[in-house]
Amino acid sequence: MDDFTQELRITVQGLEVDMYVARLDRPWLGTDYPLEGFRLTSDADVETLRRLCSHVYVDVSRGASPNPRFVDLGTPDLVREAQSEEEIAALRKTVWEVQTEFDEELADAEAAHESLSESINTVMEDLQAGRQLTIENLRTGVDAMIDSITRNPSAFVWLKAIRRKDDYAYHHALGCSVWAASFGRHLGLDRSELGELALSGLLFDVGKTRLPNRLLSQPAPLDESDSAIMRTHVQHSLDILEGTEGITLRMLEAIATHHERHDGSGYPHGLSGTEIPMFGRILGLIDSYHAMTSVRKFMESRSPHQAVMELYLARGQLYQAELVEQFIQTCGIYPSGSLVELSDGCVGVVTSVHSLRRLRPEVMVLLDAQKKPVANFRKIDLNDMIEDANGVVLSIRRGLPPGAHGIDTAELFLS
């Protein structure tokens, strides 16, 4: 039993204080509970869970054992290998504390964003002109971004979301790099590892500059033949980067494997599970999330909330389950920069996510209940349990896709 964690399925009538609840009979995403499990610390916790579920799974190695008469002994539950969780835990070399408030960090984040944007544009122009890739300018921009994200991840993520550009290649490179740095911060990577991961996210698609322009601008899904050509961008990226000064072996491995999938269904080599390097697994998850939430000519974008749900449903199949759950801890159910509709009908943009209350972020209200622009934007913190005009506690009703109700966040905040 050393390689496994044993969980016992019990009815909620058997719940007691000091039990550790590892799983529910429903997805975590519909609850306020942390995705990795929690300990029952009071009778109120027990009563809340009894109203929510009919049965749960308790980890007897991390909390009190249940009365045997409430245990379902029909099929003992042997779950994820401990190796998976230990592998992620081994990444945690640094605990990054929030050092600045969101509003304080915004100015520095803006300067870092400008620096990184300029360096991305330079690299894109060099590659399209057939010039040699140099990453020193990129590294300067990435370093400034990481400095901001390690102080407070919300400000830069928010800026990235509201300053979306029409150029998908640019937007995707920047977005993936930002999420890589944010996710790496959450996982506890040290400073040098954050740099490698963020640069890898910025560069993993550079090989697309060697593909026919018709594939990159095609306003419809690719057919089988064109898809095969598109997949060659991975090797093109490696060809470009292998001779570039400052590119590490770990970065090359991450770039080479960011389209591999946990169940072996990815490309180019059909690797699975731990055959895929950790950085490759991280980038594959981020690449998919950002693509789903981006506006593209041939595909309707999902709201961040919908994208998170898709990742969650694909955990253990396309993506390592533990990584999916940790990523959702990073971005929240409603990430910074995403549009949401509140329970009173107002619409706003999320400015900051609380690590322990993912469903109750800070929101800047943009539209009233009739979907008319408000005279003055106002920021509300849903964690303060603010009530609406009818005395009902405000909450988020649903996530909205980019551009909903004709909202252009860049125009609103940056004009």
Image (tube, rainbow, N blue to C red):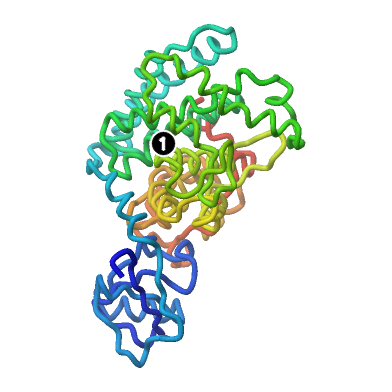
Q: Quadrant of residue 144?
A: top left
Q: In this view of the protein, which residue sits in the foreground, 44 or 37? A: 37
Q: Is residue 335 visible?
A: yes
Where does the image place residue 122, in percent across and percent down from the top left?
49, 12
SS label for mark 1: helix
Q: Is residue 218 left or right of residue 196?
A: right
Q: Which residue is mark 1?
A: 180
Vertical placement of 21 versus 242: above or below? below
Q: In this view of the protein, which residue sits in the foreground, 379 or 332? A: 332
Label 1 neighbourhood size at 10 Å, few (<14), some (14-19), many (20+)? many
Where does the image place residue 125, in percent across and percent down from the top left?
55, 11
Q: Quadrant of residue 206?
A: top right
Q: Is residue 346 visible?
A: no
Q: Quarter of the image for the N terminus: give it.
A: bottom left
- Residue appearing at x 22%, y 43% in the figure: 95
Where does the image place residue 121, in percent across and percent down from the top left?
51, 16
Marks counted in the figure total 1
For the residue marked with disc 1, what is the amino acid? Ala
Farthest residue, direction bottom = 69
Q: In this view of the protein, which residue sits in the foreground, 142 or 70? A: 70
- Residue appearing at x 39%, y 51% in the figure: 326
- Residue appearing at x 53%, y 6% in the figure: 131
Vertical placement of 165 versus 288: above or below? above
